[in-house]
């Protein structure tokens, strides 16, 4: 049974209260150190976070992680413990140690809303600050965005395949303990109904659920005894796991224990399309016409789609969702795209490596729509685009001059992201929901300051 997150928001705790400053790579600090020495540390710069392509030739991705990243940013401070470690290991010079001791991000951050869909080259995040303040955040932001967006993108495909049937995230034991919490949050943003992870419930307000595993049945002398004990403890609304031994007998034992008003049965093995049909028929024959069927058993978006015609009521997904369904990272990068020269003018800069090129300059993205249906991604370089009245601007402010807009963080930020994701998905053309490999659902175009358009 799930819990209403609105009833628990007063009991949630912050995602972290510890310093996050060393959740980074060594070379981020050595670049800061070198910039302090040559006088470029304070040069005003713009960094951009984006993905060059979508994993596995998917049609779209789901942007997730900014709410977590912003909470981690609040604790990106160097205490005596972090400074002592850096000093003892001679990572940076004493002058840089002194600068780090006073570090607090004072720049501005804007980007795509959490839950927004994205495409290759979408400038998901723009960090405007001094070089030193911005470059030091690269690893932290990428580690959050790459994982959370991978989970959310996979989860969104599963939600589409489920066709309105609810899904629960149950993958905590298939990933790292902190990743499990992040995965539950991302899956919920993408449309999952609940998670088995209690920390995700406490920290982010994600509804939690769960009843019993096979060990509960094996604990007792018999399956009927286990089922009767579970119903006695949790009520007839509980869900009984019926495949520890024989499924057909398990269903009979379940209805004998909970009656025809039993809440549900769960199937975790077997040929699911066949098994589900047989269980539904058996439940109906026993008079349990309202008893729901939940299936688990290594589901992914393809297995869920294959069950579309089966009388499944809900799904539980584990390994596949927390590992991004084959794409555990989103391939996002964090690049310097503009800096100011000595005269205070913005200078576009870009990496030119074959296959890894970037496009320099400040970007202003909009979603082109035709009668409310998304048709293209437009990125104006160097100036605001001249858009149609139906175009939707994609940037919102997260941090302005060091001041965080708190609507994007905590359980409330998660709810905003979940609501926005539903709207963004609904705006896509129907072809975007195909599970097969293909081109991105929307093409991305650059528009220069003269109005010339080119495909990204």
Image: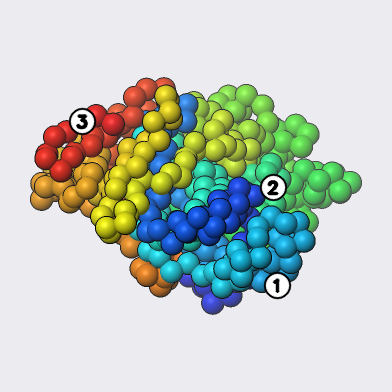
Residue located 57% across and 37% down the image? 328
Q: Which mark is residue 66?
A: none
- Colour pattern of the rendering: rainbow
The image quadrant where one finds the C terminus is top left
Which residue is more in the foreground, 85 or 217? 85
User: On residue 80, which mark appears?
Assistant: 1
Q: What's the distance in space between the residues labelled 1 and 3, CA to CA?
A: 50 Å
Give the answer, above or below, for where 105 lies relative to 228: below
User: Closest to the observer: 89 or 125?
Assistant: 89
Q: Quadrant of the N terminus?
A: bottom right
| Quadrant assignment, res 270 | top right
Front residue of 231 and 109? 109
Residue at numbered disc 3: 454
Indicate the secondary structure of the residue bearing disc 3.
strand
The secondary element bearing badge 1 is classed as helix
> Mark 2 against mark 3, which lies toward the viewer?
3
The 10 Å Cα crowd at callout 1, few under 14, some 14 to 19, many 20 or more, is few
Classify residue 312 as left or right of residue 441: right
Of the pair 63 and 306, the residue shown nearer to us: 63
Choose the circle earlier in sequence order: 2 or 3: 2
Q: Earlier in the sequence, mark 1 or mark 3?
A: 1
The numbered dot on residue 176 is: 2
Q: How many marks?
A: 3
């Amino acid at each position: 049974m799930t819990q209403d997150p609105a009833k628990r928001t007063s009991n949630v705790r912050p995602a972290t209260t510890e310093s996050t400053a060393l959740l980074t790579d060594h070379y981020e600090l050595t670049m800061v150190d070198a910039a302090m020495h040559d006088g470029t540390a304070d040069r005003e710069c713009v960094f951009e976070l984006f993905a060059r392509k979508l994993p596995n030739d998917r049609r779209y991705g789901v942007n997730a992680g900014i709410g977590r990243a912003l909470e981690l940013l609040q604790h990106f401070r160097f205490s005596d413990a972090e400074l002592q470690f850096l000093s003892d290991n001679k990572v940076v010079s004493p002058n840089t140690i002194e600068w780090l001791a006073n570090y607090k991000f004072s720049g501005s951050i804007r980007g795509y809303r959490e839950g927004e869909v994205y495409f290759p080259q979408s400038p998901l995040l723009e960090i405007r600050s001094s070089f030193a303040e911005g470059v030091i955040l690269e690893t932290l932001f990428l580690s959050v965005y790459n994982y959370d967006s991978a989970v959310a993108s996979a989860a969104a495909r599963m939600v589409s395949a489920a066709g309105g049937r609810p899904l629960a995230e149950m993958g905590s034991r298939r990933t790292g303990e902190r990743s499990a919490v992040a995965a539950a949050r991302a899956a919920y943003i993408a449309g999952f109904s609940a998670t088995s992870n209690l920390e995700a419930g406490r920290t982010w307000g994600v509804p939690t659920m769960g009843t019993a595993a096979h060990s509960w049945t094996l604990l007792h002398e018999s399956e009927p005894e286990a089922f009767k004990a579970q119903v006695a403890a949790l009520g007839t609304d509980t869900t009984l796991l019926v495949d520890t031994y024989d499924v057909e007998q398990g269903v009979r034992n379940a209805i004998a224990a909970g009656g025809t008003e039993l809440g549900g049965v769960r199937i975790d093995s077997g040929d699911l399309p066949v098994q589900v049909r047989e269980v539904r028929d058996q439940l109906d024959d026993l008079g349990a016409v309202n008893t729901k069927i939940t299936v688990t058993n290594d589901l992914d978006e393809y297995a869920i789609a294959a069950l579309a015609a089966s009388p499944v009521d809900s799904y539980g997904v584990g390994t596949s969702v927390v590992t991004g369904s084959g794409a555990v990272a989103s391939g996002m990068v964090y690049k310097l795209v503009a800096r100011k020269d000595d005269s205070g003018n913005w200078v576009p800069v870009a990496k030119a490596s074959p296959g890894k090129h970037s496009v320099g300059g400040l970007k202003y993205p909009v979603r082109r729509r035709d009668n409310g249906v998304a048709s293209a991604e437009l990125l104006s370089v160097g100036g605001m685009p001249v858009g149609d009245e139906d175009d939707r601007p994609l940037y919102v402010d997260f941090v302005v001059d060091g001041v965080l807009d708190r609507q994007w963080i905590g359980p409330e930020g998660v709810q905003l992201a979940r609501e926005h994701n539903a709207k963004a998905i609904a705006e896509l053309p129907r072809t975007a929901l195909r599970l097969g490999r293909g081109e991105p659902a929307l093409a991305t175009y650059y528009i220069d300051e003269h109005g010339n358009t080119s495909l990204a």
